[in-house]
Image (cartoon, grey):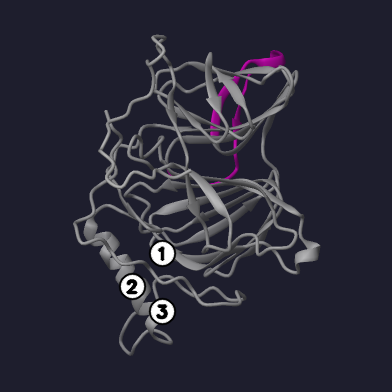
Amino acid sequence: MSNLETAPDEKVCSAGEASGIPRRLEILEPREVPLGGPRAMTVRRTLPQRQRSMVGAWCFLDHYGPDDVSAGPGMQVPPHPHTGLQTVSWLFAGEVLHRDSVGSVSTVRPGELNLMTAGRGISHSEQSPDPVYSRPPVLHGVQLWTALPSTAVGTAPTFEHHADLPALEAPGALARVFLGQLPAQHHLGVLSALRSPATTFTPLVGAQIDLAPGAALTLVLDPTFEHAVLVDTPGVIDVDGDPVGWSELGFIAAGALETTVRAAPDAPARLILIGGEPFAEEIVMWWNFVGRSHEDVVQARADWARQLAGPGAAAGEPAARFGTVTGYDGPALPAPQLPGVRLAPRRNRA
C-alpha cells in the first residue's frame, strides 16, 4: 500500500507501548522496493530504515517471495558494484545464479550460503537460471549485507560457497547457522557452540530457525550482541512473548541471555535470526557502496561511472576497480545520480 497524502507531515514513531503493555521488542516494518526494474520482482526491505539502520554489522535486509518464476523473468539483477561490505544470499526455495568479477559462477540453493566479500571493490550479477522450464518454479529467500570494519574495507574481493553448515536439532525445531556463531546451546543435553565455516570480520551471527506447529525453541544468546528476528511465516509468531508478523523484524537490544520463539499451534514457522556486537564505526551507505565518508562514496560512484564509460582503463591508469562480470547477457547497471546534499552517516536512533 502507498501513502496517498499529498503533503504528509513528518512523524516521529517508536515501537512499543500503545497497548499499555511494555514490549521487549522493537518492531521494524518492511517497505516494498522493486528489484531489477518494473517487470521484475518486488522485495520487502527492513534494513536500513530511519528507525534503525543496523543490527550489529548487519546493514541491509531484503525479504522476497514466494514468487512464481516459472514463466516470467524472475530475479534479474544486472552487473553492479559493491564496496566495503559482504553480501549474504540465503534461499528458502528456488535457485539464484551468481556471477562476479573475480571469476566466480555459483548457483545457490536452499540451505546453502553464497558469501561475497566486496572489500575495495567487486561487481556481480544475480539472476534466475535459464532456460525457464528447467528452473524451480518458486523463488523465496533473503538477501543481507554486513558492513566491513575499517580494517577490512581495503581487502581484496573474494567469494565463498558453503553447503555444509552446522545445525542444532531439538524436538519440533531446527536451527542452522549460516554465518558467524551461536553460543553454546544446552538442548538435548548437548553443550556446544555452532559456528559457520564462512569468513567474518566482526563478531556476529546469522541463522535460520524452523519450527513445527506449536513448537518452541529457546536459544542461548551472546549478551554482548544485539539481535533481530525476521518472520518468514504468514501470520504472527511469538518472540519472547511479543507478536511479530509476516516480514517484520523484531529487534532485541544487547544484554539478552536467551530468546524463545514459538510457532502458532496450527502452522509451521520459519525465522531468520541475525545479531552481532553493536557496530562501533559510523558508515556512509548509498546505493551499493559502504564507505566511511561522503568522499568514499563519491569516489566509488565515479570509478564505476568511468569504468562503464570506456572499454578499459586509459593509458597510465590502474586496472578497473570493480572488474568485469563475464557471461551475463546484458549491460551493467549505471549508478543513480547522487543527491544534492552531503551524505550523512548511518546511525541508529537512541
Labels 1 & 2 near each other (Cβ < 8 A): yes
Residue type at mark 2?
Asp
Please indicate, yes or no, whether residue 319 appears anywhere in the rendered image.
no
**Other-residue count near label 2 (Cα within 10 Å), few / some / many at <14 / 14–19 / ≥20:** some
Q: Quadrant of residue 280?
A: top left
**What amino acid is labelled 3 in the image?**
Leu
Give the numbered dot on residue 303: 2
Q: Residue at x 38, y 83 (%)?
A: 309
Q: Residue at x 65, y 47 (%)?
A: 140
Q: Secondary structure at mark 2?
A: helix
Query: Quick check: 199 above or below 337?
Result: above
Q: Type of residue at label 1?
A: Gly
Q: Residues within 10 Å of mark 3 (few under 14, many from 20)?
A: some
Disc 3 to disc 1, C-alpha distance: 14 Å
Answer with the quarter of the image where residue 263 lies. Answer: top right
Residue 308 is marked as 3
The range drawn in magenta is: 181-201
The residue singled out by tag 1 in the image is 121
Question: Image point 61% across, 60% down: which residue?
Answer: 75
Name the mark nearer the viewer: 2 or 3. 3
Distance of label 2 from label 3 (alpha carbons): 9 Å
